């Protein structure tokens, strides 16, 4: 008669491997995070359960709108995942007291899942009555909530697959990750940028495993914090991933297993198989400079979220990249003017003497020549008659024998410019290949300037 049959979770998906770990059966005892119904059975949509506790929460500074009050409810068990492990909160509904209450957020407090619902019309008594301890209620993922959950699961399981392949195939550990709500794109952060060939190889390997339909299951054991390893760190001191939160008191440890590919501690919800997670990687990485280190973000999506949604996610990455590049250009223009202003002030103090200056920068800009040119033109425009010769150089923070440093020479006399650079005119730019050293390349430039 056209009834829709929902997919179900295999019975061997959730495996308790410690004899001391059991799902609490007492309805007045909350099931801890790590053993929740949404974690044992990620495809389950609805559950009859019992209220354990209810409180009313209101901001310290209450707005005029009475809807600011929220009912804060702990249930014996739930299909609504509380945000954690990098995965956003589920949303859903609770049928209680003959009314449907919208769950706008769920969080982990200590070891337990807490549901947040707006108090209807500010009627605190109605909320407290509906969620009196011991009351039977039904908690569900409605269609919107399930679509949201499925998207989160798809992205989270894809992230585990992607991170495993990056580490085992390219020795690139995942430093951090972002699993966001649609349509914001998801990404993993790795220690360096990747070539298009590397990205293509990872995508091909991931989708080969997807085609094989590797299964996913969860193993749960008693948590022994004394046996837990600390977060690994790179030589730079940067942490790799995250440790178990210090405030977690649920007492269990979950490990998500992708057969033959990955074993990773995680509290999130995951699909029972990767068979429909066709992975799509954007063919570039965005560099992130952090003091002395440079990491990169690799954005990804999956066709399991629905092919029509992929272009929007990709488009958002492209648009954000354009906005970021525009912000960088604007900031570099301001910085170039600021540097030029300082040099001009020095130049004006020379009282007619030839102003000679070398400035070297360590900079990971994508357009070093454009940046140095902007400084050069700002100097020329502000001091067209002042005698000067200025050498600007820029090198990347990480250098090898094939690295390129940019050299820009500008002055008031083309002969002096030619002495340091070449060509004709008042400006010359070139490139130095190799490792730029202050006591070698910079010293040589300074010697030439001193002889002028």
Image: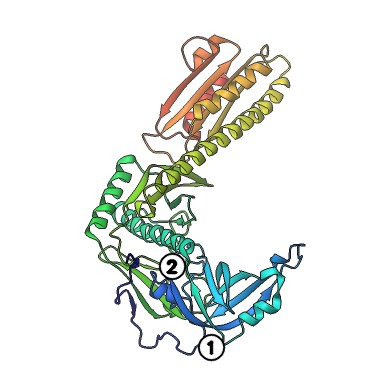
Residue drawn at x 39%, y 54% as measured from the top left? 305
**Disc 2, SS:** loop
Q: Say which residue label 2 marks.
A: 268
Residue 193 figure quarter = top left
Point out the image quarter for the C terminus. Answer: top right
Q: Say which residue label 1 marks.
A: 28
**Percent position of residue 160, x then y:** 36, 60
Is mark 2 in CB contact (under 8 Å) with mark 1?
no
Q: CA distance from mark 2 to mark 1?
A: 24 Å
Residue 240 figure quarter = bottom left
**Disc 1, SS:** loop
Residue drawn at x 38%, y 56% as measured from the top left? 173
Q: Nearer the viewer, residue 216 or 295?
A: 216
Residue drawn at x 42%, y 76% as measured from the top left? 253
Answer few, some or many: residues within 10 Å of disc 1's Cα (few below 14, many 20 plus, some between 14 and 19): some
| Residue 452 can be seen in this image | no
Q: In the displayed structure, would residue 421 be above or below residue 61?
A: above
**Tag count in the figure?**
2
Q: Nearer the viewer, residue 184 or 68?
A: 68
Residue drawn at x 30%, y 44% as measured from the top left? 200
Q: Nearer the viewer, residue 148 or 442?
A: 148
Q: In the displayed structure, would residue 285 be above or below residue 24?
A: above
**Percent position of residue 191, x then y:** 42, 50
Q: Nearer the viewer, residue 73 or 297?
A: 73
Q: Position of 277 compared to 354: left or right?
A: left
**Percent position of residue 199, x then y:** 33, 45
| Residue 124 can be seen in this image | yes
Q: In the displayed structure, would residue 127 be above or below residue 279?
A: below
Q: Nearer the viewer, mark 2 or mark 1?
A: 1
């Amino acid at each position: 008669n056209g009834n829709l049959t929902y997919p179900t979770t295999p019975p061997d998906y959730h495996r308790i491997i410690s004899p001391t770990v059991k799902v609490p059966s007492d309805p007045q005892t909350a099931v801890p995070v790590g053993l929740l119904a949404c974690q044992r059975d990620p495809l389950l949509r609805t559950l009859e359960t019992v209220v354990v506790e209810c409180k009313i929460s209101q901001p310290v500074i209450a707005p005029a709108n009475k809807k600011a009050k929220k009912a804060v409810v702990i249930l014996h068990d739930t299909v609504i995942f509380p945000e954690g492990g990098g995965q956003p909160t589920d949303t859903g509904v609770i049928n209680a007291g003959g009314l449907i209450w919208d769950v706008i957020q769920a969080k982990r407090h200590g070891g337990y899942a807490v549901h947040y619902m707006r108090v209807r019309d500010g009627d605190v008594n109605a909320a407290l009555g509906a969620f009196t301890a011991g009351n039977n209620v039904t908690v569900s993922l409605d269609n919107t909530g399930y679509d949201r959950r499925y998207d989160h699961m798809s992205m989270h399981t894809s992230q585990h697959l992607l991170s495993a392949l990056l580490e085992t195939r390219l020795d690139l550990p995942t430093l951090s990750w972002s699993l966001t709500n649609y349509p914001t794109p998801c990404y993993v952060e790795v220690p360096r940028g990747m070539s298009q060939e590397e990205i293509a190889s990872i995508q091909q390997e991931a989708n080969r495993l997807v085609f094989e339909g590797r299964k996913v299951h969860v193993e749960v054991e008693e948590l022994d914090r004394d046996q837990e390893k600390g977060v690994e760190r790179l030589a730079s001191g940067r942490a790799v991933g995250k440790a178990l939160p210090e405030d977690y008191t649920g007492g269990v440890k979950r490990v998500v297993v992708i057969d033959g590919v990955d074993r990773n501690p995680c509290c999130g919800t995951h699909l029972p198989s990767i068979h429909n997670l066709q992975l799509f990687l954007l063919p570039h990485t965005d560099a992130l400079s952090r003091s002395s280190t440079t990491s990169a973000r690799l954005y990804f999506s999956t066709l399991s979220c629905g092919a029509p949604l992929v272009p929007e996610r990709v488009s958002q990455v492209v648009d954000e990249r354009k906005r970021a590049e525009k912000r960088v250009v604007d900031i570099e223009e301001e910085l170039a003017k600021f540097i030029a202003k300082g040099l001009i002030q020095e130049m004006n103090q020379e009282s007619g003497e030839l102003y000679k200056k070398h400035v070297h920068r360590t900079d990971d800009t994508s357009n070093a020549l454009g940046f140095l040119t902007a400084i050069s033109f700002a100097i020329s425009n502000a001091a067209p008659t002042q005698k000067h010769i200025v050498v600007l150089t820029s090198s990347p923070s990480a250098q090898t024998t094939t690295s390129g440093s940019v050299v820009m020479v500008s002055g008031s006399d083309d002969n002096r410019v030619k002495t340091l650079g070449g060509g004709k005119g008042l400006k010359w730019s070139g490139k130095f290949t190799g490792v730029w050293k202050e006591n070698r390349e910079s010293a040589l430039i300074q010697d030439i300037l001193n002889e002028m």
